[in-house]
Image: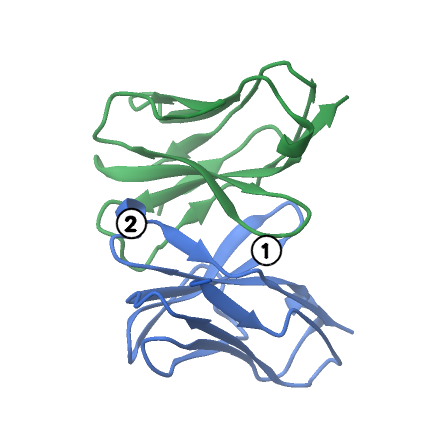
Chain colours: A blue, B green
Amino acid sequence: NAGVTQTPKFQVLKTGQSMTLQCAQDMNHNSMYWYRQDPGMGLRLIYYSASEGTTDKGEVPNGYNVSRLNKREFSLRLESAAPSQTSVYFCASSRPPGGLYGYTFGSGTRLTVV
Amino acid sequence: AQTVTQSQPEMSVQEAETVTLSCTYDTSESDYYLFWYKQPPSRQMILVIRQEAYKQQNATENRFSVNFQKAAKSFSLKISDSQLGDAAMYFCAYSPYGGGADGLTFGKGTHLIIQP
């Protein structure tokens, strides 16, 4: 089925390790997003990309970097993981404006930093 | 910046009864979109219902309906004939009319429990 694919689904890291969360969509959407979800906090925007080659910071960008490799792929990198980055991460995409055409979410990545 | 507030961390309802989840938001824009998302234990984000702010008519999707009060900046979700499968986290969310860098702004969520 068409949609947003995130890998991996689960990951455990040691403090200081690095990793990249991968996200790909096959709906030809221009906009892609990374969110983190913490208990009692809802989903908060980390980074956003309106198109290939462009990225913008969201509400909680510190400690993260992103790459919009092409129209399909938008990756999130943790250079030096910290326990505060333990969270569930969601990738989403939309055809702008997202409010009109809707947002499609991936199934999430549960990341634990020990 | 826009903010979305869900004042009920948890709600409980008997199966087959009606429950209303509350949401308020703050924005200086006149045109925007509002959403309710359901997140079951599977973690998947499922769109329940959407409302365009420029439409006065309240959106309805089967057993789900909203009460949209634009002047009061209120957007509540009513679930009629509650079913066990409705048990989940429910998130209210806001999106600007033109899309843009903000994407969706979410509330903190309401955990809905269905009592059999």
Residue at image mark 1: A37
Could one spot residue B27 in this view of the protein? no
Residue at image mark 2: A101
Element type at mark 2: helix
Could you tell me which residue is drawn at 48 percent across and 73 percent down?
A: A23
Could you tell me which residue is drawn at 61 percent across and 83 percent down?
A: A19
- In this view, the residue in front, B103 or B27, is B103
Element type at mark 1: strand
Q: Position of residue A7 (x, y in %)?
A: 58, 74
Could you tell me which residue is drawn at 54 percent across and 70 percent down?
A: A6
The disc labelled 1 sits on which kind of residue?
Gln
- In this view, the residue in front, A53 or B45, is B45
Q: Quadrant of residue B93?
A: top left
| B28 relative to A66, above or below | above
- In this view, the residue in front, B82 or A74, is B82
Q: Position of residue B101 (x, y in %)?
A: 31, 60
Could you tell me which residue is drawn at 33 percent across and 81 percent down?
A: A70
Q: Is residue A97 left or right of residue B69?
A: left
The disc labelled 2 sits on which kind of residue?
Tyr
Tag 1 and tag 2 share a subunit: yes
Q: Residue furthest top?
A: B17
Quadrant of the frame with the C terminus of chain A: bottom right
Q: Residues within 10 Å of mark 2 (few under 14, many from 20)?
A: few
Q: Position of residue A102 (x, y in %)?
A: 34, 49
Tag of residue B97: none
Q: Quadrant of residue B59?
A: top left
